[in-house]
Image (tube, helix red, strand yellow):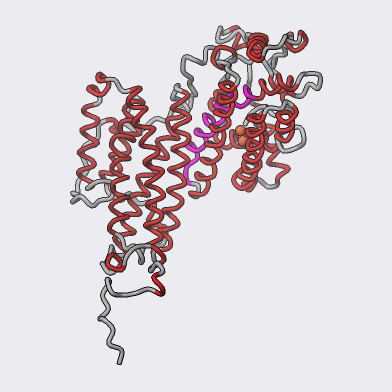
Amino acid sequence: MNQSNPITPETYQSYRGLPSLAGLGRFSEAMKPGLSVEESVTRLKRHHYALRRIHTIMIAKLTAEPIYELKMGFSYHAFLSAEAVTLLRARVGEMREPPLGLDKVPHPAMEVFFDEILGAEKIEEVILGVYEVALPSLISGLQKHIDQTHLLADQPTRRLCRQIKTEAEEMLEWGKKSIECLVTPQIREAAKPYLSLLSISLACMGSIDGTQSPREEAPARYYSNKPYQYDKVPRRDERFQDPFNQGVSPETFLYDEAKPVDAKILMMFFKRIREIDVPEMMGSIIMETPGKPWEYYRDLTRQLWDEARHAMMGETGFVSLGIDWAKYTAPNLNWSYNLNTQLNPAERHAVLYFIEQGLMPKTGKRFEWEVSIMGKNPLATTFQDYDWADEVLHARVGRDWYVSSMASSHEAIENGDKCWAQVMQNWEGLRTKGLTQHRNWWPELYTEYCKKVGKTPDPETLAYAISYEGKRADLKDLSYSA
Ligand SMILES: [Fe+2]
Ligand SMILES: [Fe+2]
């Protein structure tokens, strides 16, 4: 008989010392029982609820929030939250659980907690609620879930929690820095009743993950006593000095064969940064279209984030040239403003699709990429390459969620065209109301650019001045936005 040592976690040998358990951990750890499936699902559902609500808060705020950096940060965090929600839903569905329970509020205090953040009066309060209260609790709940669930039996959940935690920490980092920049001691002092209500709610729910002895009740509401009013009117911060200016048509310039390619790149950077208006508009579609399957919100949020990235590509392009975009250009909000205030959400989506499917032919995104190559600008080439790839995805999102609701793709395009034609640009009206003089900022931008690169401005390029004149027909075959 083999007189080998009795098997213990210490004496048990793997083949030639190879890592056991696929490297997940040691036997001594794997021998400890972990959370039940039921408990693990309960926690997953709480993480899910929190992230779903954070997603909505981000989307709800980005349109009316004037500060550009906050719009961009909210767009990103809406995307990260939506991705996390998608993973969590899938995992819950794998755990003997019909995914139906995902729409249930896990604890009444959780609803109050997130309603309060959504309904908070000031953006600083929203930021404090999300980044100083909600996310730290979510992160510690995720860590606890990682530590307590079984490393082998519940490995897919552990992996998921780790992934989500890493991204939640990235969100938190941004939030902390933003709080340092925006929240004064006076604002914090004034936010005391609200912040203390958030703490009480958190105590009632037993933390986001529900592990801190939850109580049955929910606290009395403060901000969320009155129903939340979504604000779909886009606003901009003071760097946008002329937000209704439609005095320059980058499209006309871009498709003019006589214009030099380097100047066209400048116009493309402007086109990109002007795309701030797309998240502003798409946020309103998401907020005002309830009752769709989760995948609808995920796809639209992804597209919203892509459009925010496109805007930041334009911003980066200007920085790369050493040009202050705020001083030399006027990214306007007319498109998001007009669509949000004149069309219903289904019509807005129709217009978005109509414009985006028009970007696919040769005159669209491929053209912009080719201009970047001809202009020998590697940064613009990278940006346009991905902008084009993103656009192909957006056309697919449009087919999946808009065209599929129409009788045919022909009708979908017709309807988009009709809705777009309905939008009143009222170019002259903006002038008579004193909202803008449609100042032609191009010569100053071009002069500044020539100065930076050390060349003499080409007189014909400098003299360029074509306005929209308020006629939508002028834009019909041009890639306006998105
Ligand atoms: Fe875009
Ligand atoms: Fe797009």
Question: In the image shown, does 455 or 216 lie closer to the viewer?
Answer: 455
At 68% from the left edge and 41% from the top edge, which residue is drawn?
412
Question: In the image shown, does 144 or 278 lie closer to the viewer?
Answer: 144
Residue 293 highlighted magenta (yes or no): no
Percent coordinates x, y for residue 215 in the rendering: 18, 49
**For the N terminus, which image quadrant?**
bottom left
At 58% from the left edge and 29% from the top edge, which residue is drawn?
313
Quadrant assignment, res 168: top left
- Is 461 positioned to the left or the right of 148 in the image? right
Task: Specify start and end residues of the magenta stretch as a single range.
Answer: 269-291
Percent coordinates x, y for residue 292 in the rendering: 50, 47
At 39% from the left edge and 45% from the top edge, which residue is drawn?
166
Percent coordinates x, y for residue 76 in the rendering: 47, 36
- Report the predominant secondary structure element of the magenta stretch: helix
The correct choice, above or below, for 161 with respect to 466 in the image is below
Q: Residue 308: tell me if it is visible.
A: yes
Quadrant assignment, res 96: bottom left
Question: In the image shown, does 361 or 366 lie closer to the viewer?
Answer: 366
Percent coordinates x, y for residue 192 in the rendering: 21, 27
Residue 283 highlighted magenta (yes or no): yes
The correct choice, above or below, for 464 with respect to 339 in the image is above
**For the C terminus, which image quadrant?**
top right
Counting the numbered discs, the total is 0
Quadrant assignment, res 145: bottom left
- Is 256 positioned to the left or the right of 45 in the image? right
